[in-house]
Amino acid sequence: MANQADSSDSKGTKKDFSTAILERKKAANRLVVDEAINDDNSIVSLHPDTMEKLQLFRGEVVLIKGKKRKDTVCIALADDTCAEPKIRMNKVVRSNLRVRLGDVISLHQCPDVKYGNRVHVLPIDDTIEGVTGNIFDAYLKPYFLEAYRPVRKGDLFLVRGGMRSIEFKVIETDPAEYCIVAPDTDIFCEGERIKREDEERHPQLFKSIGVKPPKGILLYGPPGTGKTLLARAVANETGAFFLCINGPEIMSKMAGESESNLRKAFKEAEKNAPSIIFIDEIDSIAPKRDKTNGEVERRIVSQLLTLMDGLKARAHVIVMGATNRPNSIDSALRRFGRFDREIDIGVPDEIGRLEVLRIHTKNMKLAEDVDLERASKDTHGYAGADLAALCTEAALQCIREKMDVIDIEDEEIDAEILNSMAVTNEHYLTALGNSNPSALRETVVEVPNVSWVDIGGLENVKRELQETVQYPVEHPDKFEKFGMSPSKGVLFYGPPGCGKTLLAKAIANECQANFISIKGPELLTMWFGESEANVREIFDKARQSAPCVLFFDELDSIATQRGNSVGDAGGAADRRWMVCLLRRLSLSSEQRTDQISLTLRFFVLVVLISSSTFLSLMRSLVTRSFKSCLRKSPVAKDVA
């Protein structure tokens, strides 16, 4: 009976449990979300008494705050059929606020909303498929002419026209994040279609099938590929609280303080859930415990393991780590229940480089001759940070050209000079010549300006090299069309001075691929196992920077017949070449890496590398002609 009495008031009427949460917090601006009758993206409906309590006028623009720090602006209208204290909004507005029916939002006056000068909107790609005609005239113009619609940067809105509905996203608004689209507001819809983001994962989906949701994600890849940027983008798109921990920051000289800093970070994340904990350079605080000599590092790894195991299944906390050395992290972290997913953030391909260049140049003043597509093709192996540096260097080249006409002592630069400045394609070519991929800075060499015309004779050899190395790099689609597998490598052998090294440099220059030159003896070290590690590192760098030409000079100094390596530190040569074989076979067809090897002593290599999976083409080189050697020299007519 007591329970029944609690669930009813003195008059015997039943409580509305959908609004029971508001009894604790009596603020009049806290309202319960209800389904809208008028399906308009810009309108919310309230009871007239609610509007009177909040001192709102009919048609006033209001600011609505939802979940996950999301908010939007709408027009408030009175509706006698709307119950108190509820607010009616359609599905689009609820999606922008990340709320559902029955959730609580807060409503605020927004008197400072200005008329927009410029609004940029773009359609969502999967809603525009098959649509023909002018999208602006057919959809956007009628939609914004109906009323003075408030918009917020980042919001989605749905426009119905004819038999179709197209979803748009507000990309930019001027002069502020919130504005009202008036008849004189400029509306732009030019640009790439927006790719729809995957919907945020709901833990209920995992609970319904009886599994635990992922707790951790490890991002690994070369420096500058965007691991930290990607983590921040995920937090921003999901509206989650973002807590960034730079590995060395939690270290302390006081005993136990490093572990305490880690516990405080996890506690703060749970307090602000849903949240993302991002640990940058995680390899600096979680190294392999069996290979570290410091007791502090071991305790931090143990503390991190305990904290990740202690995360509740429904705590809504995700741990993300980033590193460029995944094999240096303690193996206990790399199992299910801790870092469940490991994602390789590699160097972007040609399409990815073009998108990155467009992002970095969207605010740059470019001349009409700038060809970003060509720049994306010429920047093999460039990470996102390298492309940003390339754009900056091109802009600096433009500024250097104008330094002769700029007086540094003047407080202001002449407007005519500023208007005449624009980054040209020549600036990009100069910047490209002065830069190289960060992943290859330890091993890359300057590719000489050597072309086929610098090599006299050897016509058959040059033809075979073009077919073997150059064509697969420049025309991969043709090989795929005819079902051909490109060759795996080339071995040059012949007497000294016949042009072996020159041919390798020429082919790298002709196909515009990354070029890594390795002197055979450079791989050898006195430490056990380190020579094999050097081979693995070189092939890993080549894989990251594909298409790439690997040039092994003086290969015979490190490659002897297997079985003949008695007395060389336990068969080190055999181990080196076993690693080389395994790494070479692991390269996929998409990771275009050609291997060119050079030797004077062919007979010691035949047993090992005559396999077609390693070096497909073996070429003997004869002496080059006098004509190429004297091509740039004045020669008398009587010289035959």
Image (cartoon, rainbow, N blue to C red):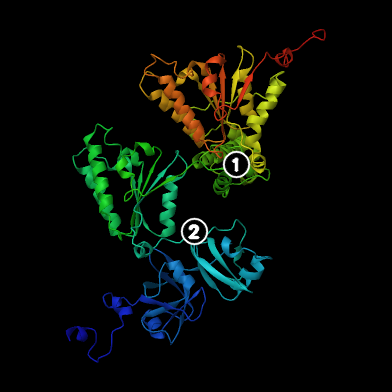
Which residue position holds label 1? 376
Q: Residue furthest right?
A: 638
**Labels 2 and 1: the sequence-earlier one:** 2
Report the label total: 2
Q: Identify which residue, 497 or 108, lies in the foreground.
A: 497
- Residue at 52% from the left image edge and 28% from the top image edge: 444
| Amino acid type at mark 2 | Glu
Between circles 2 and 1, the one closer to the viewer is: 2
2 and 1 marks in contact (CB < 8 Å): no
Q: Eyeballing the image, is 572 above or below 103?
A: above
Q: Identify which residue, 254 or 286, lies in the foreground.
A: 286
Spot occupied by residue 381 in the image (x, y as percentages of width and height): 54, 37
Spot occupied by residue 402 in the image (x, y as percentages of width and height): 61, 37
Question: How far is the residue under mark 2 from the one under mark 1?
Answer: 25 Å
Q: Identify which residue, 497 or 195, lies in the foreground.
A: 497
Specify the label residue 197 is tagged with: 2
Spot occupied by residue 415 in the image (x, y as percentages of width and height): 61, 46
Quarter the N terminus occupies: bottom left
Quarter the C terminus occupies: top right
Q: Check disc 1 and report its element: helix, strand or loop.
A: helix
Horizontal side, residue 70 vs residue 292: left or right: right
Crowd class of label 2 (few under 14; some 14 to 19; many from 20; radius 10 Å): few
Q: Check disc 2 and report its element: helix, strand or loop.
A: loop
Specify the label residue 572 is tagged with: none
Crowd class of label 1 (few under 14; some 14 to 19; many from 20; radius 10 Å): many
Q: Eyeballing the image, is 84 above or below 133?
A: below
Horizontal side, residue 515 vs residue 426: left or right: left
Q: Residue furthest left?
A: 2
Can residue 39 be seen here?
Answer: yes
